[in-house]
Amino acid sequence: IYNELQILDKQVSSLTKYVYEKTGCPVYKNTDVTYLESGEKKYGILLDELKKAKKFIFLEYFIIEQGEVWDSVLEVLCEKIREGVEVRVMYDGLCSLSKLPIGYFKKLRELGIKSKPFAPARPFFTTQQNNRDHRKILVIDGKVAFTGGINLADEYINQKERFGHWKDTAVMLKGEAVWNMTAMFLHMWNVITNNREDHSLEKYLPHMYGIRRHLKGMDIFSRFVILRWITRLLERMFI
């Protein structure tokens, strides 16, 4: 893609090279982008896409607040847990001050959801309290992703008024670019949980599902070599 962009637009190609070198996130083709012009628009589509999940659901949001939006999302997540779908939820730790009960992640864990707050609020002053996670990311099966400025709270669909009519936007991605968001989520998850189990990102690549079924009879080393080779080949194709 970088070489193609050099021909089409050198300024854009330079920007994509910079982003890849600084973040490790390449630019992808074969991705459909849907513009969601309001929280109301995103809310309905998000619920529909959640209901289609078969493998995993990753949520990382700055604000999650109990109400119509989150209660509806949580209902679907619990349904997916019963179907065997892996569900993980991250939210910013400041939510526990006014949006969610203290220790809310423990309730989610009781429901079968893997959950962890980012930088939980502390009862003493520290400059680290300024380190917040403002991301709004939802990834479904590595095939569909949402991001933008819309959190999971009722004011974003104007069911509750805080500062007048709320206008924010989001996008829905379908295709190869979703891999970037999958990797971003898992990287943050491993940072805040000190997790050593999810060092391999390959199992969350959607095109690996069928491949892994054929590798079940191989020894661990052979499977690792083949998966690593496939992943590096795909990375060269996408960049």
Image: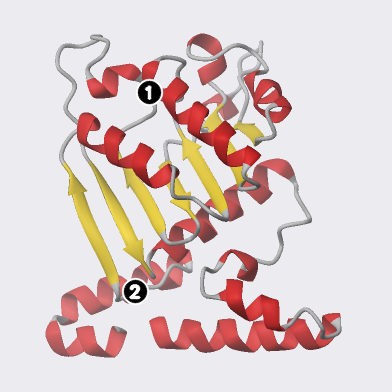
Q: Position of residue 135 (x, y in %)?
A: 42, 40
Gap between marks 1 and 2, in whole Å? Answer: 31 Å
Q: Position of residue 227 (x, y in %)?
A: 66, 82
Q: Are marks 1 and 2 in contact (CB under 8 Å)?
A: no
Outermost residue toward the front?
A: 83
Q: Report which residue position mark 2 lands on.
A: 28
- In the image shown, does 193 or 182 lie closer to the viewer? 182
Q: Quadrant of residue 151 in the image?
A: top left
To which quarter of the image does residue 166 belong? top left
Quarter containing the C terminus? bottom left
Which residue occupies 27% across, 90% down? 3
Instruction: Say above or below: 204 vs 79.
Output: below
SS under mark 1: helix
For the question of whether residue 137 can be seen, the reply is no
Q: Is residue 35 above or below residue 178?
A: above
Dividing the image into 4 quarters, which one contains the N terminus?
Answer: bottom left
- Would you say 63 lies left or right of 87 here? left
The amino acid marked with disc number 1 is Val
In this figure, which residue is indicated by the disc labeled 1?
Answer: 69
- Image position, residue 152 (x, y; %): 39, 27
Above or below 91: residue 162: above
Is residue 153 left or right of 90 when viewed as pictured?
A: left
Residue 101 visible? The answer is: yes
> If you read the primary sequence from the N terminus, does the residue marked by circle 1 or circle 2 appear first?
2
Mark 2 surroundings: few (<14), some (14-19) or many (≥20) residues within 10 A: some
Question: Along the line of sight, which residue is nearer the eye, 106 or 216?
Answer: 216
Percent position (x, y) of residue 51? 44, 43
**Which quadrant holds residue 176?**
bottom left
**Secondary structure found at label 2:** loop
- Give the amino acid type for the residue marked by disc 2 in the picture: Tyr
